[in-house]
Amino acid sequence: MTDSYGPGEFEGVPTDGAADLAGVPDAFQRLWTPHRLVYIQHGQQPDEHACPFCRAPELSDEQSLIVARGEHAYVLLNLYPYNSGHLLVCPYRHVATYDEATPEEVAEIGELTQVAMRTVKQVSRCDGFNIGMNQGRIAGAGIAEHLHQHIVPRWALDANFFPIIAGTKALPRLLGEVREEIAEAWPR
């Protein structure tokens, strides 16, 4: 079954073609998403007592999607991944930015990142990684008050327009399956 949308409409959201706008026409169609204004203005920061990265280690590894635990930091799957196998490395301690982390936390975050890359490469045969930290709400951190590093596996053919056009990311594996596979392959 296919959905059909009227002209100037995508899944019920109004769109404007370039020819309908003032100025020099271009090839872009504009997708208006006023519902995102709440996120842009206020973000989705949890209450300081409801930090998911502080709570995760208190749960079972399966419940919290943890694949490995260290002494100062741990590794878990991102609940809203960019790609299958998208991991986060978090210190147990509730600190907001990298400069607040202790030397021991920094060292273990680095070590866990290296092991995560090797393990994900072995399990998923990815071609590369995006690694980074968004620090502070203004920098795009989804959970700004608890430091976390993203490790996103990439494949040569993983780029497509589905997320842009349909607002949807296709993830070929369930989080539980990915967690189990990475956790089992993690060196002991």
Image (tube, rainbow, N blue to C red):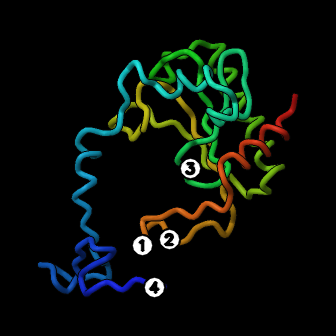
Residue 2 numbered mark, or none: 4
How many angstroms separate mark 2 from mark 1 (CA)?
A: 5 Å
Which is nearer the N-term, disc 1 or disc 3? Answer: 3
> Neighbour class for label 3 at 10 Å: few (<14), some, many (≥20)?
some
Q: Are the residues flagged by discs 4 and 1 in contact, CB closer than 8 Å?
A: no
Q: Quadrant of residue 9?
A: bottom left
Q: Quadrant of residue 142?
A: top left
Q: Which residue is mark 1?
A: 165
Which is nearer the N-term, disc 2 or disc 3? Answer: 3
Mark 2: amino acid? Phe
Q: Quadrant of residue 126?
A: bottom right
> Neighbour class for label 1 at 10 Å: few (<14), some, many (≥20)?
few
| Quarter in which the C terminus is drawn | top right
At mark 2, the secondary structure is helix
Front residue of 14/157: it is 14
At mark 3, the secondary structure is loop
At mark 4, the secondary structure is loop
Q: Are the residues flagged by discs 2 and 1 in contact, CB closer than 8 Å?
A: yes
* Residue 52 point in image, percent of width and height: 50, 28
How many angstroms separate mark 4 from mark 1 (CA)?
A: 15 Å
Residue located at (16% from left, 83% from top): 20
The vertical placement of 69 against 45, above or below, is: above
Which is nearer the N-term, disc 4 or disc 1? Answer: 4
The vertical placement of 80 against 34, above or below, is: above
Mark 1: amino acid? Ile
- Left or right, 114 with reference to 59: right
Q: Which residue is mark 3?
A: 81
The vertical placement of 55 against 132, above or below, is: above
- Which-is-in-front pick, marks 4 and 3? 4
Q: Which residue is mark 2?
A: 162
